[in-house]
Image: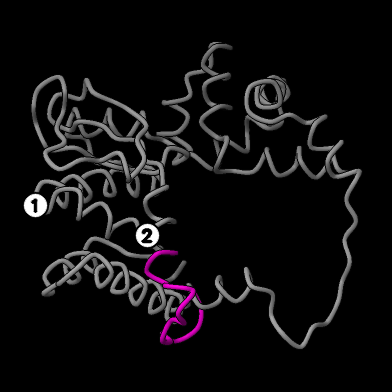
Amino acid sequence: EVEEVIIKGSSRFGKFTDRFFSVARRFGVDVDSMIERYGARRTHLMLLSTVIAKEGLNEIFTDLLNLQGIKAILSTKRVYLSHDKEMKILAEIFLKSFLTPLAKPDENTDLSDIVKTRIQNKTYFSVCLSCFKYESLIKVREIQEGFKCPICGSRYIGFVTPYSSGIKQSLKNLRNNVKPRDKEIEKVQNELVESANLFLDYGRLGIIVLSGYGVGPRTAKNILRLRILDERQLYMEILKAEQEYIRTREFWGE
């Protein structure tokens, strides 16, 4: 049962989709053409019914997930449900960080530190949109002032989550100035261009603000135009934007 749950989760569209696409290419499948014709989600769904999915899962469990190790750990655990009058510390921090209206932090917990740690550890796939030759995985904390393409020296660098589907097709479209027909590809292209523009204008601070949950380019620019006095204020402004997004996201059509 545990194995079934893990396999089902690993097969979902999202985190490991690029791995499935990579396996399909080795099998001789023209994945990019399929994505352009059917869209990333439908292509992923079509591949799940083939031997490619089995090979993809084998690679995931060999390279990324220790299936037997997970099963061994879970076999030693028990889940207990209880109704406590008081929240556990981690639950309280999470709710304060995301869901509740801004409250004055107590002397032991500064919400700005929680937000900072979360954002600084976020990983991006970065790519130079000038020469298209530089690609790298990078954490927000690794982005330094003056960061630029090590190949051509441009600062026009796009950032997107590494598990976004259709990155390769998006870059191909941008390189050839092609408008995408698939909504997933269009979304990735827009994220690459908008993040590159933000980085060009505001540097690493632009990517820090854009890394907030639900923070888009427009909101990021509004935050960056404020008179930010110190780092703590910056992260508290990001937190406000995150809370506003969570409060209103049902109206965003997501």
Q: Quadrant of residue 36?
A: top left
- Within 10 Å of disc 1 (Cα), the crowding (few <14, some 14-19, many 20+) is some
Eyeballing the image, is 194 above or below 98?
above
Q: Is residue 50 left or right of residue 3?
A: left
**Residue at point 33% right, 64% down?**
215
Frontmost residue, 43 versus 140 = 140
Q: Which residue is mark 1?
A: 201
Q: Residue 1 in the image: x percent, y percent?
A: 90, 44
- Within 10 Å of disc 2 (Cα), the crowding (few <14, some 14-19, many 20+) is many
Eyeballing the image, is 178 above or below 33?
below
Magenta-drawn stretch, dominant element (helix, strand or loop)? loop
Q: Is residue 142 magenta?
A: no
Q: Residue 31 in the image: x percent, y percent?
A: 48, 24
Q: Which residue is mark 2?
A: 116
Q: Secondary structure at mark 1?
A: helix
Q: Is residue 123 left or right of residue 19?
A: left
Q: Hey, what amino acid is under mark 2? A: Lys
User: Which stretch is magenta?
Assistant: 98-114
Q: As drawn, which residue projects farthest toward the front? A: 107
Q: Secondary structure at mark 2?
A: helix
